Image (cartoon, rainbow, N blue to C red):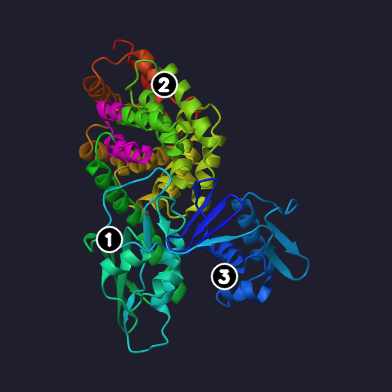
Amino acid sequence: MRYRFASCRLDTDRHIFERDGEALHLEPQVFDLLVCLAQSNGELVTHDLRLSSVWKGLHVSDATISARMNAARRAAGDDGKAQRIIETVARRGFRLAVPVATEGPGSGVPQEPGPTLSTSKLPTLTVLPFRYQVADPFDTLADGIMDELTSALSRVGEFHVIARQSAVALRDDPDIRTVARVLGADYLVEGSIQRAGERLRIAVTLLDAQSRTLWSARYDERLDDLFEVQDRIAMQVAGQLPVKLRGAEIARANEMTEGSGEARAWVLRALPHFWRHERAENDQAIQLLSRALEIDGQDVRALAYKAWALAQRPAYLWSEDAGADRAEAKVLANCAAARAQDDPPTLVAISAAFSLTLPDPRPALAFAQRAIEVDPNNAWGRMRLGWALNYSGRPAEGLSEFDQARRLSPLDPLLYNMLIGAAISHVGLGHYDLAIAIIDEVIASTPQVSWAYRILASIHRRLGDRVNEAIATRKLVAANPRLTMKQLEDALPPGMVRQSPTYISWQLLDDCSSV
């Protein structure tokens, strides 16, 4: 069912909320609260009705209800003072103060989903009820994992998540294609739980709408604490699944014709070039993101990712004009920041661009923290928060974030960035041997990260090891034959204080005068 009121549109089947034609990411309870108000169509929504329809009869505090109602008002473009759309009835409840129009589902013959994308339509995901192979019909573990996983995935921002109740209604339908068609889902998550005493084996699978397996994982747990198990599984799946789904969406984007007029397709095409970490690939990513902005100059992710890609050029010794690259990156990042709302991928990219272009580390820190507040399981968000903490002179906290990022996404395409960040944290903590070992490991597995030799050289210099310092310096120059002193100076982000122990590669400059 679809509801329209004021400038808003609610689609309960696809779990989509739009205002002024733009899709907004909402917490599940905020979405359900707006659905409850829309369904009441101007009638009073009492406290008891809110508890039964939104919180499923659970007891919640008045502060929690108030916070969700404030979020619903913001989403609808209203506030508690104006109350143009959502009206408070003192000591009784709330109601919509505007007319509501309803639309039923389409009556056409369903078609198999094709490789189509939209700038305003993210892919739709549903979490199906987990199969629990246990004799006790009252055991709530499976439903609890489904609830936690649905809630965790709804914060990601890279796809819409269908409301739990819609998925539960199809619990007994074994055909994935039928379920996908009825729910309008592009991707589905299913799982099973086996139990032997206190031991649990939990299997999770990501499927597309044609029932093809895209990813699967198995987790062995002990049932020491029911809620902790639910949280751990939700965290691990929500950390790894977006990477796999992003890959599927990139494949769909690549199936589309080159003449596609959808900005989102060009952003998706840019991502593999962006994370390959090579100069030519980064330039290709910038070109594809520029194409997205030619189609839609307001595409917030295209703005943010292009800012990040441009900001990388000086830092990784790829820039011909560091000042111009950083200036353009700042303009794009500020444009994205004005439109970011609570979209985690955009917030992460803005944080990265600000870290590499601004003298003040606080804006980068604020955007990374905001991304994590929205989606605590965002591995890239944890990674950028770690860098922002390093830049702020807080290496111990930064190290914790890098460790969390790697736990969330152990095979991430940006794993090298997480590891180098952790190495910089260890330098700040005086753990030089650990930092050297990590950097050696990264360079061995990712040879294109040649700029890391400058960090190695600076660590060896601090340790007084002139032999290894010279070896690292020669390797840096060999990997960058056109390297100049100016490039080395420009590589240092403006916010990095040279005396700070969290980033010491500046010391290499004194020994590169002959380059």
Residue 364 lies in magenta, yes or no? no
Q: Position of residue 465 (x, y in %)?
A: 31, 28
Q: Check if mark 1's residue and mark 2's residue have beta carbons within 8 Å.
A: no
Mark linked to residue 54:
3
Q: Which residues are magenta?
A: 260-284
Q: Earlier in the sequence, mark 1 or mark 2?
A: 1
Q: Position of residue 276 (x, y in %)?
A: 26, 36
- Indicate the quadrant containing the C terminus: top left, top right, bottom left or bottom right: top left
Looking at the image, the residue that sits furthest to the front is 107
The amino acid at mark 3 is: Val
SS assignment for the magenta stretch, majority: helix
Answer above or below: position of 8 versus 150.
above
Mark linked to residue 325:
2
Q: Which residue is mark 1?
A: 209
Q: Position of residue 146 (x, y in %)?
A: 40, 70
- For disc 2, the neighbor class at 10 Å (few under 14, some 14 to 19, many from 20) is some
* Circle 1: element type: loop
Looking at the image, the residue that sits furthest to the right is 90
The amino acid at mark 1 is: Ala
Label 1 to label 3, Cα distance in Å?
28 Å
Q: Earlier in the sequence, mark 1 or mark 3?
A: 3
